[in-house]
Image (tube, grey):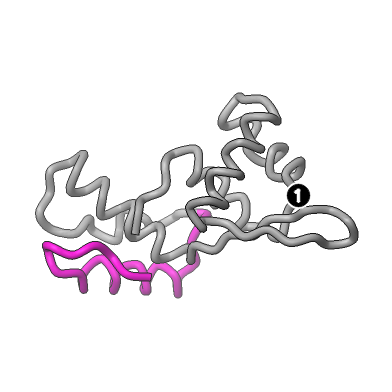
Amino acid sequence: MAVPSTTELCVLKALWKRHPLSAREIHLEVERELGWSFSSTRKTLERMLEKEMVEQEVRHGVQVYAARLEKVGTLAAFARDFGRRVMEMDTPLPVNMFTGSKLVDAQELAQLEQMLNAWPDDEEPQQ
């Protein structure tokens, strides 16, 4: 799985918390963190559609989006990439790094720990 960019992850986090959302609603969720225009949000959503990270449908005459990438698997891939590429670690990041996160609950934290510890060194994480 390709690891989402920082901006893509921001959009995904908004969609994991509440979905489906219109492009305008997504923009309102990410605007403060990303500091960009509505057209940048739309362009990012288009790229994410092409990469099959999000899905789009029409509800009540409005195009809305939902995440196609599963939250825990995506966060595990992101954490693994960070550990290997940025921190140059050959072992999984300790799951206690994620304790206190507002993004994952206790069950998801346990699932994340299992995923991080289960991957062979030469394989990408699976969702």
Vertically, is 104 above or below 9? below
Q: Is residue 38 left or right of residue 8?
A: right
Q: Residue at x 36, y 50 (%)?
A: 3
Single out the residue that lies furthest toward the right: 60
Q: Give the answer, above or below, for where 69 lies relative to 49.
A: below
Mark 1 falls on what kind of element?
strand
- Residue 101 location, x and y as percent? 46, 54
Quarter that holds the N terminus:
bottom left
Residue 27 sits above or below residue 108 on the image: above
- Which quadrant holds residue 88? top left
Q: Identify the residue at horizontal 74%, vertical 55% (top origin).
A: 64
Q: Reply yes or no: does residue 118 show up in magenta.
A: yes
Q: Quadrant of the C terminus?
A: bottom left
Label 1 amino acid?
A: Ser
Q: Which residue is mark 1?
A: 22
At 78% from the left and 53% from the top, the residue drawn is: 63
* Vertical order, 44 against 59 (above or below): above
Q: Is residue 70 magenta?
A: no
Q: Which residues are magenta?
A: 102-127
